[in-house]
Image: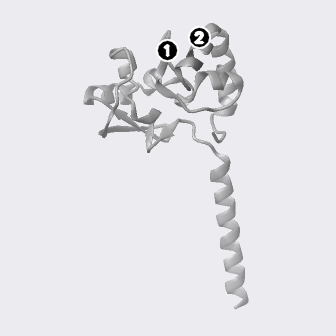
Amino acid sequence: MRSQALLSLKLLAATLLLTTAVAATGDPVFVEDGAAIRGYDPVAYFDRDGPVKGQPNLTAEHDGATWWFATAANRDAFVTDPERYAPAYGGYCAYAASRGYKASTDPRAWTIVGDRLFLNFSLSVRETWLKDRDNNIRKADRNWPTLRNEPR
């Protein structure tokens, strides 16, 4: 009986440690409804000039998230070079990242600067972000390594 109680306590302790470790680790990619960036195709921002909803049957895994694509060609391009197409800051709001926290994004609130895709919480937040875009990017780039694995 004593050995069963001790085993139960050890299992409980292991479960609590695992749960704490998982809870302390945030998602590096903005996921909603089981898909990165709300199921929008990240490649489409570059080749179709804007957001296009992906298909749940055209997916790829990257950075712990499932990404949806509008076409097989887009999926293949992403798989070949995910760093080129994945949005900055894991698809979290670029303005929020510049301020030191994570926030969700609206797929319509996007901007491409150089070869990087940036998403924002809303169209109005994007307008605020754009007013000091380069400085906001520098701040977010500096903050992101710390924010990356924090909970949202």
Label for residue 99? none
Mark 2 falls on what kind of element? helix
Query: What is the residue that sits farthest to the front in this orientation?
Result: 124
Q: How is the image coloured?
A: one colour
Mark 1 falls on what kind of element? strand
112 and 62: which is toward the camera: 112
Q: Looking at the image, is 72 positioned above or below residue 16?
A: above
Q: Residues within 10 Å of mark 2 (few under 14, many from 20)?
A: some
Q: Residue at x 69, y 18 (%)?
A: 139
Q: Residue at x 35, y 21 (%)?
A: 44
Q: Position of residue 88 (x, y in %)?
A: 54, 23
Q: Are marks 2 and 1 in contact (CB under 8 Å)?
A: yes
Amino acid type, residue under disc 2 in the picture: Leu
Residue wearing tag 2: 130
Q: Position of residue 148 (x, y in %)?
A: 63, 34
Q: Residue at x 33, y 16 (%)?
A: 48
Q: Residues within 10 Å of mark 1 (few under 14, many from 20)?
A: some
* Disc nearer the start of the sequence (2/1): 1
Query: What is the residue that sits farthest to the bottom in this orientation?
Result: 1
Q: Looking at the image, is 21 positioned above or below residue 40?
A: below
Locate residue 43: give its quadrant: top left
Q: Position of residue 27 (x, y in %)?
A: 57, 41
Q: Quadrant of the N terminus?
A: bottom right
> How many numbered circles are shown?
2
Q: Residue at x 56, y 18 (%)?
A: 124
Q: Looking at the image, is 128 positioned above or below residue 21?
A: above
Residue wearing tag 1: 111
Locate residue 143: give its quadrant: top right
Q: Is residue 3 left or right of residue 92?
A: right
Q: Position of residue 103 (x, y in %)?
A: 60, 32
